[in-house]
Amino acid sequence: MKTNLVYVLCFAFITVTTSCRAQLMQNLNDAHKIADNKNQFIGKPLKYLLREIKPDIKMVIPGEGNNYKPSSFSFLFITKKQYEEYSTKKATPLTIKVMVKENFKWDWKERSAQEKKEFLWTKADDKKYGDLTIVYINVYGSN
């Protein structure tokens, strides 16, 4: 009886300590934490990094790779309209750039057909690109 209680308590402790961990980037001011801990994501699937980012990714700028350069995603936390405002001021918004090992195809034609979806990061994108392997992370810009 005592043995079962010990197992139950150990299981409960492990469950609580692993499931209650906060995300690394709770808000935009925490972006430096992604940069400081980037080595824990290198060589891992993109989905692990995405789980650590709580603020909504409102825009993505994909970079399709080739034999000479890796594919990449630049994740932004502003809308396309806000991005254009930054551009006119020659300012750089907070961006998390992630290069991945595998090449991917971003379907511009399909996304352009859906109004305002061209640069939108979706749950479907999480699923489609989540297994790509991270090779580089850079955080830059300001919020």
Image: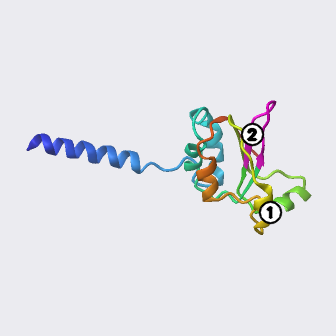
Hey, what amino acid is under mark 2? Ser
Residue 76 lies in what quarter of the image?
bottom right
The C terminus lies in which quarter of the figure? Answer: bottom right
Q: Position of residue 94 (x, y in %)?
A: 74, 51
The N terminus lies in which quarter of the figure? Answer: top left
Helix, strand or loop under label 1: helix
Residue at horizontal 15 percent and vertical 45 percent from the top:
5
Residue at horizontal 25 percent and vertical 42 percent from the top:
10
Q: Is residue 70 magenta?
A: yes
Q: Nearer the viewer, residue 86 or 74?
A: 74
**Looking at the image, which residue sits at the far top?**
68
Residue to which mark 1 is pinned = 112
Left or right: where does residue 101 sit relative to residue 116? left
**Looking at the image, which residue sits at the far left?**
1
Q: Is residue 19 above or below residue 103?
A: below
Hey, what amino acid is under mark 1? Ser
